Image (spheres, rainbow, N blue to C red):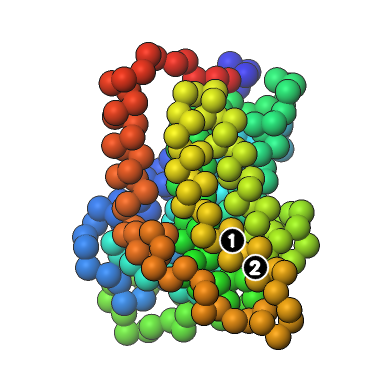
Amino acid sequence: MWLQSVEPALELFRLRRIQSIWYKELFQSGRTPWTDPYRYVWQTHNDLTKWWEALSPRHSCAIRGYFELELLYSYVYVLSPSPRVPQICAYAQKLIFEHCAQYSGKLLRVVMATAYIGKPPLTFYDMMRAYMTGRQFIDVLARNPDTVLGRTEPSPPIPDSSSMDLEVDTPYPPAPRIVMYRSAGGDNIGRAIGTLNDFTTILSILGLQFGYPTWRERFQKEAAPLLGELHYRRSAPPQLDTNMDSWPTDSAAVTSPYNSVSSVLATDFAQSIRSQPYRQHSR
């Protein structure tokens, strides 16, 4: 697949450059939270979109599918909590909800596909990304369910013209547009339930493929309180539909720091490598 042209490799290098820059800025440049982080976050989100829109139409379906999964995962990652942005705004939470729903839907179709032609290559790291993205989905729902599940679109944060977080003279970038992913389930509660189930199925299939079934079990345990509340909310009478008192505000999803998912995965991965034989990645 990759021998047909060097153009996909060049596109991947361009994406890795964007990813490397924002990862360094958000996670490695310092620990002090920015006062106006969304000048940088919106610009990075827009840069990723421009990269995607500039892709050559000559790429095969497999390559475009691979790049789209990379794009959606990057969207979620750059919008999620980080040392520079420990508390994310409601508008970013809504964006994460939609990007996660789209990511899980597309990745599920890939892992369920039986034909090789047009199927993006999958590796162990796709399972890791699915788990991390699923955890971010749980986090935003548990933190701010009213806003994330509501029909009203939240407003982006007001720009802080006095902020000196970054020495830039460019105009303030526009906030990314929230686009509702047309997934099965109907309303947002149904879509949330469907997305959680999609992540569980993905982790089940990839866990068997790569020898890590415990990740699906861990995700199911972490998602169980939220799923129970979502089903209750969906079946509750209309007058109780906005009662959020029973939502799990003290769950692990809410109290986990921004780096907890990565540290858990790293520990689990290291232990598994020591205890299990090598398994080749699947294409």
- At 51% from the left edge and 60% from the top edge, which residue is drawn? 225
Closer to the camera in the image, 195 or 32? 195
Residue under pointer 1: 228
Residue 2 located left or right of residue 23: right
Is residue 16 in sight in this rendering?
A: yes
Closer to the camera in the image, 29 or 199? 199
Cα distance in 3D space between marks 1 and 2: 6 Å
Looking at the rendered structure, the kind of residue marked 2 is Tyr
Whether residues under marks 1 and 2 lie with C-beta atoms below 8 angstroms apart, the answer is: yes
The circle on residue 118 is none
Closer to the camera in the image, 137 or 95? 137
Residue 138 located left or right of residue 113: left
- At 67% from the left edge and 79% from the top edge, which residue is drawn? 241
Secondary structure of the residue carrying numbered label 1: helix
- At 39% from the left edge and 14% from the top edge, which residue is drawn? 278
Looking at the rendered structure, the kind of residue marked 1 is Gly
Residue under pointer 2: 232
Q: In this view, does 187 lie above or below 59?
A: below
